[in-house]
Amino acid sequence: MVETAQEQTVPKHIAIIMDGNGRWAQEKGLPRTAGHKAGGENIRPVLEHAKARGVKYVTLFAFSAENWNRPKPEVKYLLDLFRKYLFGDIKELQKEKVRVSFIGSREKFSSDLVERMREIERETEQYDDFHVVLALSYGGRQDLIEAVKRIALDIREHKYLISAIDEEKINDSLSTHGIPYPDLVIRTSGEQRISNFLLWEMAYAELYFTPIYWPDFNEQDLDIAIEAFGRRNRRFGGLK
Ligand code: FPP
C-alpha cells in the first residue's frame, strides 16, 4: 500500500544536528569538553526512543568537516570520544541488532578508526529494523563534490552518457547512498541553520528547531518534535 503524506505521522528518517554541547557546559561553569561528554551520553536514550517510536533511520551529525578547525585540544577530545564510542558503547547498539553506518570523509581519521568503521558496517549490515547513520567529518558540499567526481569518472570510462545523469545517479554517488531522504531534521540549541548538513538529501525535509541544548534533549522532546512533524501538512508543492 502506498502511504500518503497525511497518514505518515512518525517520520521514517530523522536527522539530528546535535548542537549546544559547549554552551550547556559553559552555563554550568564546566569546560566545553564536559558538554561533549554529556552529549555523547545522550545519544543512546534518544536512539532507543526513536526506535521505540517506529523511526527506521536516525542520522546524527557528530562531527562536521568544519569542526577540524576547532582548537586542537577540543578536536582531540572529540576524536577520543568517538574512539571510545566506536570501540565500546556501540557494542550495545550491535547487541540490539541496530545497523550502523558512517557518512563523511574518512581521510583524516587514523587507520584503526577507519578499519573499525568498516568493521562495524560489515558486522551490522544484515540488520534492517533500525539504522543509525553517524556523520563524521561530514559536509554536504564536500559530499556533493565527491559525488560529482565519481560521476565524471564514470562518464570518462563510458559507463553512461551525460544525458543519463539523474537524481538516482547523484543519490548513488553520495555517501548517503541507500539511505532514504530525511523526513525531519532537528537542530537543538536555538540556532536556525542547516550548517552544511545533508544539503541535497533534506530538500523536502521538515525542519524543527528547539532551544534545548543537545545534552538536555530527551525522549519527551523527541516526542514533541515527532508530534510537530505529524501536524504539518506535507504537500511537496502539489495539491491534495
Ligand atoms: C555541537 O556542540 C556538537 C558537536 C560539535 C559534536 C557532537 C558530538 C557529540 C554529541 C558527542 C560525541 C558523539 C559521539 C558519536 C560519541 P557545540 O560544541 O557546537 O556547542 P556550542 O554551539 O554550544 O558551542
Image (cartoon, rainbow, N blue to C red):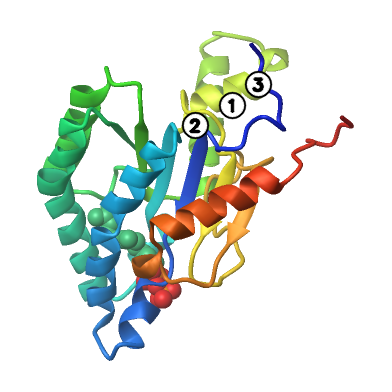
Residue furthest to the top? 159
Asked whether disc 2 touches disc 1, contact meaning CB atoms under 8 Å apart, the reply is: yes
Q: Position of residue 180 (x, y in %)?
A: 53, 28
Which-is-in-front pick, marks 1 and 3? 3
* Label 1 to label 3: alpha-carbon separation: 25 Å
**Can you say whether 172 is above or below 160 in the image?**
below
* Label 3 to label 2: alpha-carbon separation: 26 Å
Q: Is residue 131 visible?
A: yes
Q: Is residue 69 visible?
A: no
Q: Position of residue 181 (x, y in %)?
A: 56, 33
| Mark 2 crowd level (few <14, some 14–19, many ≥20, 10 Å Cα) | many
| Mark 1 crowd level (few <14, some 14–19, many ≥20, 10 Å Cα) | some
Ligand 1, image quadrant it occupies: bottom left
Residue at the (18%, 24%) spot, across then down: 123
The mark found on residue 170 in the picture is 1
Badge 1 marks a residue whose secondary structure is helix
Which-is-in-front pick, marks 3 and 2? 3
User: Which one is in front, 215 or 160?
Assistant: 215
Q: At label 3, which amino acid type do we have?
A: Glu
The mark found on residue 174 in the picture is 2
Where, quadrant-wise, is the N terminus in this rendering?
Answer: top right
Q: Earlier in the sequence, mark 1 or mark 3?
A: 3
Residue at the (86%, 32%) spot, across then down: 238
